[in-house]
Each structure stands twice: as structure tokens, then as C-alpha cells.
Image (tube, rainbow, N blue to C red):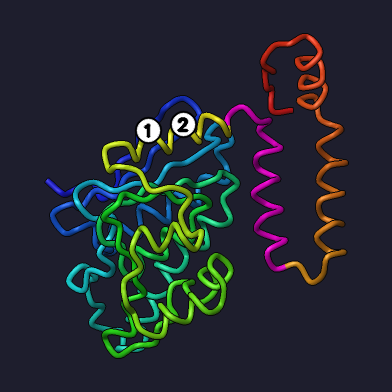
Amino acid sequence: MAENPITITARGEIEIVALNRPARLNAMNEPLIAALLEYFTQLRDRPEVRVVILRAEGRAFCAGLDLAGWPRDPDAGPVHQVWHTQRMIASVMQAMRRCPQPVIAAAQGPACGGGFSLLLASDVRYAAPDLRMNAAYIKIGLGGCDMGASYFLPRLVGASVAAEYLLTGKFMTAEKALACGLVSEVVPAEELLDTALKLAGEMLLTSPMGLRLTKDALNLNIDAGSMEHAFALEDRQQVMLSGTADTVEARNAFFEKRPPVWGDR
């Protein structure tokens, strides 16, 4: 029976997506990438899912590219073959950023190459003490900048730390990741999922549209052309949200000293 490369578990408005190739350290083969791409792309049309938790089965988060997991097209040249693999994996990171749901990653063990980029493309990261991340590409004769690492990492940890790791391919430990703000917390491996679920539960206390537009503003304003651009986007979002029924409900709930009941309208 063919393996199911990912598993999806629903917890109400939260979905838990797990990489499910533990025997191969969750290395990226074509079926795994195809499944992740389909899942994160379709999230744009699934507003009933409000938060996603990304995790992995086994002792590793993701060991990077599975070199034996991409069937060769006999009619394609080597450049075309590599381009297909590159674009397919990169599209997963782009779909993660474009989906309106916050993505909380909970990771343990090695997260190499594309596995590192899956974490970088997430919105929040929690680490087990044994998490070790690297942009492995430069170790095999390629450039250190791949799968969005040169975009995400400097914005998350600053140019100097990013250069240190992208120019060497050395591993970043969970302790170092915590010190430079790449992960929010380091927790025992057995507590990773519960920690992520707790944060997801806090996110569910917010209005659905407010949560979606907050991720949207964070994505857009990290590349804002100026302070004025950032303020203009925030102003427009707040005006939009102030006209929703959920804002009226939030105000009423505040005065009535009760939790709001969101209608996403």
C-alpha cells in the first residue's frame, strides 16, 4: 500500500498537518511536496479552517530533499528536471505565506534544506531541544540561498546571523534559534503539539476576519516601501474591520462581560 505522505487531523477550527515519512526522516519526495502544495493552496477556499499546525512524525522534522524520490522524465533535459523540482518545492513555501490561516510549526530533530524553509515560511515556530536547522545546499556545491531562505532568514534574524548560516551551511541549534528570535519557545518534544494547540486556541479567540487580515498585513508590511505605506494598509484594514458584524459582537460581548460569538461576517 502506498504511504500517505501527510496526515491531516481536525481539531474543530484547527487542522494539524503532519509530514508522514518517518522512515525517510520526512525527506521531500514528489508525492510529499504535491500533497503539501495541494493542501496549502486549497486553504484559501476553506475559511472554516482558522489555524494550521505543521508538525512531523518520527525523530526528524524534515531531512531535506529525497534525491531518490523524484522520478526522472526521460524527455526532459537536466536543467528542465531540476527546474521542475525547484519550482514545485518553492511553490509550497509561497502557498504557506499566501494562505490566510496562521501556520504554527512544531519541530524536532533535523530540519535541513527545504525542511528549514518550511519552518521559515511558517508564522510561528516552536522547537524541541534537539531541533537542528541548516541551509544545506552550500554543502553540496550549490548556493546557500534556496527555497526562500535568502528572503525569510534575514527578515527573521537579521542580515549578519543569516549570512553566518547561509554562507556556511552549518547547523543552527534550538538554543541559538531562541536567542535570535527565530523560534518562540523551546519545549520538550512531548509538549510540542500541546504548546502549538494552546497558541492556536488563543488565536481562535480573535475574530476570523481580524485574524486573516493580521497575517495579511504582516506579510505585506515586511516589504512595505515606507512607514507611510505600512500605516496606510493598517488604516484601511481597521476601517474595513470596523464595519463587520463581528466588531459589533465584540463590543457587545465586552460590555456584557461574556466571550464573543463570531459569525465571520
What's the distance in space between the residues labelled 1 and 2, CA to CA? 6 Å
| Residue bearing mark 2 | 198
User: Which quadrant of the figure contains the N terminus?
Assistant: top left
- What percent of the width, then of the height, locates residue 164? 43, 80
Residue drawn 50% across and 55% down? Answer: 96
- Characterize the local packing of mark 2: few (<14), some (14-19) or many (20 or more) Cα atoms within 10 angstroms: few
Q: Amino acid under label 2? A: Lys
Residue drawn 52% across and 38% down? Answer: 51
Q: Is residue 34 above or below residue 255?
A: below
> As drawn, is 171 to the left or to the right of 201?
left
Q: Are marks 1 and 2 in contact (CB under 8 Å)?
A: yes
- Characterize the local packing of mark 1: few (<14), some (14-19) or many (20 or more) Cα atoms within 10 angstroms: few
Give 77 or 44, whichever is nearer the viewer.
Answer: 44
Image: magenta residue range: 204-223
Query: In the picture, residue 53 is in which quadrant?
Result: top left
Q: Amino acid under label 1? A: Asp
The label number, if any, that marks residue 194 in the structure image:
1
Residue drawn 35% across and 43% down? Answer: 187
- What percent of the width, then of the height, locates residue 169? 34, 79
Give 119 or 170, whichever is nearer the viewer.
Answer: 170
The label number, if any, that marks residue 25 in the structure image:
none
Q: Say which element carries label 1.
A: helix
- What percent of the width, then of the height, locates residue 86? 39, 75
- What percent of the width, then of the height, locates residue 182? 48, 60
Label count reads: 2
Magenta includes 7?
no
Give 49 or 178, whichever is nearer the viewer.
Answer: 178
Residue drawn 18% across and 51% down? Answer: 22
